[in-house]
Amino acid sequence: MMMPKIVPEYKEEAKRRIVEAGLEVMYDKGYCKTTMDDIAKRLDVTKPALYRYFKNKDELIIESAKILQEQYRRINTPRGPDICPVEVWIETFDQMLSPNLNEHALLFEIFAMTVREPVLREFSVERMKQGIEYPAQAIAKRQEKGQVTEMTDPRTLAIAFVALFNGMRVMYLLGVERDELRSRWIEIIKALFKVRTECHVDCPKYEVCHITAVQNNIEK
C-alpha cells in the first residue's frame, strides 16, 4: 500500500491509516507485543515511513486510544421523551459490549497506561468526566418526567452505571457468557433506576425485559 505524501492535505489521512492499522494489530497481539514492524507490515510500508508521522509506538498508542475511546462516545441510543429508559440502557449495553474480547483487553491495557502517560491520562480523565456527566444529565431529565425515581442523586446513579458496565467488561474477559451478562444487566438496571412507568407491549424491548424477568425468577 502506498502511503500518501507528507503534504498538509494528505498528512491526516496517512495518520488515520496508520492508527487504524495499529489498532488492528493491537487487537490481535495486544499493546505490549505489537511492534512498529508489525504495523508497517500490515500497511505494506517500511518502518521508517511510520516514523515520519509518529515518533514511537507510545505516541501512536496515544492517538489510537483517543480514537478507540471516541468510538464509544459515538454510540447511538434511542432518544425521545417517550422512550423507555430501560430500552436506552439495553441498547447502550448492546453497542458497547462488543463480542470481540480483544477489543476489551486492549482497552484495559490502555487504561493501565494512563498511570505512566500524562498526555493519555489527561485525555482519559476528561473522557471519564464526560462519561459520567452525560448519563447523569439524561437521568435527571428522566426524573423530571417521572420515569425514574427521584430518591437517588443522578450523578450517583451515573457512576454506578459506569462502574457496573466496566465490571461486566472484566467478567466477560474472565469467561462469563455475554448472554448472561446482558440478562443480569437488564434486571440490575431496572432495579437500580427504579423505573416507575409500566413497560408497554408495543415497546421494542418489551419481550426482552419480560423474558429476562421470567427466566431469572425461574432460576431463583
Image (spheres, helix red, strand yellow):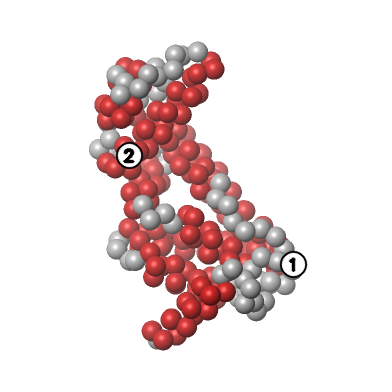
**Based on the displayed image, in which of its 4 quarters is residue 120 positioned?**
top left
Residue 7 in the image: above or below residue 141:
above
- What label sits on residue 61 in the rendered view? none
Residue 45 in the image: above or below residue 85:
above
Mark 2 vs mark 1, CA separation in Å: 44 Å
Q: Is residue 214 left or right of residue 49?
A: right
- Residue at 36% x, 33% y is 22
Residue 146 in the image: above or below residue 62:
below
**Based on the displayed image, in which of its 4 quarters is residue 91 positioned?**
bottom right
Q: Secondary structure at mark 2?
A: helix
Q: Are marks 2 and 1 in contact (CB under 8 Å)?
A: no
Q: Amino acid at mark 2?
A: Met
Instruction: Count neighbours of disc 1 (C-alpha within 10 A) and say few if under 14, some if 14 to 19, many if 20 or more.
Output: few
Q: Secondary structure at mark 1?
A: helix
Visible residue check, residue 51: no
Residue 23 in the image: above or below residue 169:
above
Residue 196: % across, % down: 66, 77
Residue 31: % across, % down: 31, 39
Residue 119: % across, % down: 47, 34
The quadrant of the rendering that contains the C terminus is bottom left
Identify the residue position indicated by label 1 in the image. Answer: 144
Question: Of label 2 and label 1, which has the lower sequence position?
Answer: 2
- Residue at 48% x, 78% y is 211
**Based on the displayed image, in which of its 4 quarters is residue 52 positioned?**
top left
Front residue of 137/205: it is 205
Front residue of 20/51: it is 20
Identify the residue position indicated by label 2 in the image. Answer: 26
